[in-house]
Image (cartoon, rainbow, N blue to C red):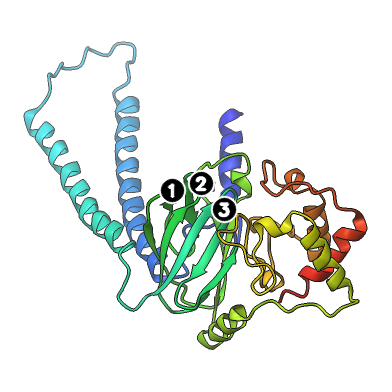
Amino acid sequence: MAALGCLALALTACIENAPLDSLDAKGPFAERINGLFWPVFWVATIIFVLVEGAILVAAIVFRDRPGRAEPRQLHGSSRLEVLWTAIPTLILAGIAFPTVSAVFDLTKCGGDAMPVEIIGHQWWFEYRYPQADVVTANVLVIPAGKEICASMTSEDVLHNFWVPNLNGKRYLVPGQTTTLRLQAYEPGEYWGHCAEFCGLSHSLMRARVQAVPAAEFEAWIEAQQQPAPVPAEGTAAAVGLAVFQARACTQCHSIAGTNDVENPFGPNLTHFASRHVFAGATLPEQGEEWSDALKRWIANPPEVKPGSYMPDLGLTEQEIEDVIAYLETLQ
Ligand code: CUA
């Protein structure tokens, strides 16, 4: 029963269109990994079948039966020993060379790759576009078909950036820079997850990569470079901005042109509403309205994301609604 239970659990990984499917390559770097995985998998499968088959045959054909004489006793065979040492050595060497060369290729960027910076925080990913002076969070927007060279580091503890459709896992290490190549063949949304236990809400540290056509990417960059609009007086958004300024929000969240913070602790909110997910790309949940999720989040962040450094500020329901009205203008 325990074995069947484990098998059922393992089979749940075979769900159709799973968002974190590492066997579903959507770009050249993930494909390179799959190109290593499948030959190794089949070689291992053949060896497994041969070895297990030989064990079964030996156990059944040569089993003890009444009246059987004692079989001839052997003490090893040098020829066989050499053979079954040499064959695995050749197989392992055949696997090792392409593997080691892939490990280096997957992290050494091409000359015309577009640089981005990925910074890990407890518990969200920050993205910077140094050539365009754009800072965003949770959703990494990239041009489809173009190589991205990600320079990665962490503000606090070890994290690991993993978007299985596009490449393997790579650590984000405080005080160090690691490099990862990313590329999507086609426009689309690719899910990611922090792949290193990094504290209480590690399981809620997700990522999205959104690949868009090149022209759309240029337009997106241009829009992201604009400062945030200042709401007209008398609107709900203006009241929301006043709430934002009166409470501690201003300490941690930069909003270009409105609230510039040096080394902000939280995500940059200048174009918050242009991102379809927030709170470490965990909200809104499936089927939940964006504004409902936002209400839930602002009302009590640590309840949604245990350990969240965004505190419960004790806003009234009205204040929350005003803040949301303001955030919605940050397109
Ligand atoms: Cu960051 Cu796990």
SS under mark 1: loop
Q: Amino acid at mark 3?
A: Cys
Taking the image as shown, residue 184 lies to the left or right of residue 318, namely left
From the image, tell me which residue sits under label 3: 14
**Nearest the camera: 281 or 101?**
281
Taking the spot 34% from the left edge, 52% from the top edge, the residue there is: 42
Marks 3 and 2: which is nearer the front? Answer: 2
Tell me, yes or no, whether the two marked residues, 1 and 2, touch with CB atoms within 8 Å: yes
Taking the image as shown, residue 233 lies to the left or right of residue 272, namely right
Marks 1 and 3: which is nearer the front? Answer: 1
From the image, tell me which residue sits under label 1: 174
Q: Amino acid at mark 1?
A: Pro
| Vertical side of 260 occupied by 42: above or below | above
Expressed as whole percent of the image width and height from the top left, the position of residue 87 reads 16, 43
Expressed as whole percent of the image width and height from the top left, the position of residue 104 reads 27, 59
**Nearest the camera: 298 or 258?**
258
| Vertical side of 58 occupied by 32: above or below | below
Which corner quadrant of the image does residue 269 belong to? bottom right
**How many discs mark residues in the rendered view?**
3
Q: Amino acid at mark 2?
A: Asp
**Mark 3 crowd level (few <14, some 14–19, many ≥20, 10 Å Cα):** few
Taking the spot 34% from the left edge, 11% from the top edge, the residue there is: 66
Report the quarter where the N terminus lies. Answer: top right
Tell me, yes or no, whether the two marked residues, 1 and 3, touch with CB atoms within 8 Å: no
From the image, tell me which residue sits under label 2: 156
Looking at the image, which residue sits at the far left? 78
Residue 288 seen in this snapshot: no
